[in-house]
Image: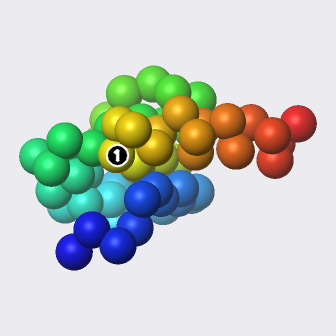
Amino acid sequence: DGRLEGYIGLNLEPWDMAAGVIFNREAGNKVTTLDGRNWQLGEPSIMIANPAFYKNLENYLKEKIS
């Protein structure tokens, strides 16, 4: 219902992500792997955010990993 601005998931099964990917892409959100590649079925990680917030989430993740 629009309360979440971004989501990061690690080591998930494809069936845990597939429906959410469809919903989010249809809503206009950016859906990628943690390294920024376009998410595809079978990827173990996922990062989802609205386009305006995506860069902030990406920068936060890079800061935490460094």
Q: Is residue 7 visible?
A: yes
Q: Residue at x 88, y 36 (%)?
A: 66
Depicted 46 relative to depicted 40: above or below: below
Q: Which quarter of the figure has residue 62?
A: top right
What's the colour scheme?
A: rainbow
Residue furthest toward the right?
66
Relative placement, left or right, of 22 versus 63 is: left
Residue 34 coordinates in the image, percent (x, y): 57, 38
Residue lying farthest top? 37
Please state which amino acid type lies under the numbered disc 1: Asn
On the rendered image, what quadrant is the N terminus found in?
bottom left
The count of marks equals 1
Q: Of 7 and 33, which appears nearest the observer?
A: 7
In terms of secondary structure, where does tag 1 sit?
loop
Is residue 43 among what the camera can see?
A: no
Please name the residue shown 70% across and 44% down the image: 60
Give how far across and how far down residue 20 sits, in percent.
25, 60
The 10 Å Cα crowd at callout 1, few under 14, some 14 to 19, many 20 or more, is many
Q: Residue furthest front?
A: 52
Q: Position of residue 41 (x, y in %)?
A: 30, 42
Q: Indicate left or right for 1 with 35 as reference.
A: left
Residue under the image location 40 percent in, 48 percent down: 49
**Looking at the image, is 12 positioned above or below residue 55?**
below
Q: Which residue is mark 1?
A: 50
Q: Residue at x 58, y 45 (%)?
A: 57
The spot of residue 6 in percent (x, y) is: 46, 56
Q: Nearer the viewer, residue 51 or 13?
A: 51
In front of the other: 54 or 47: 54
Q: Quadrant of residue 13?
A: bottom left
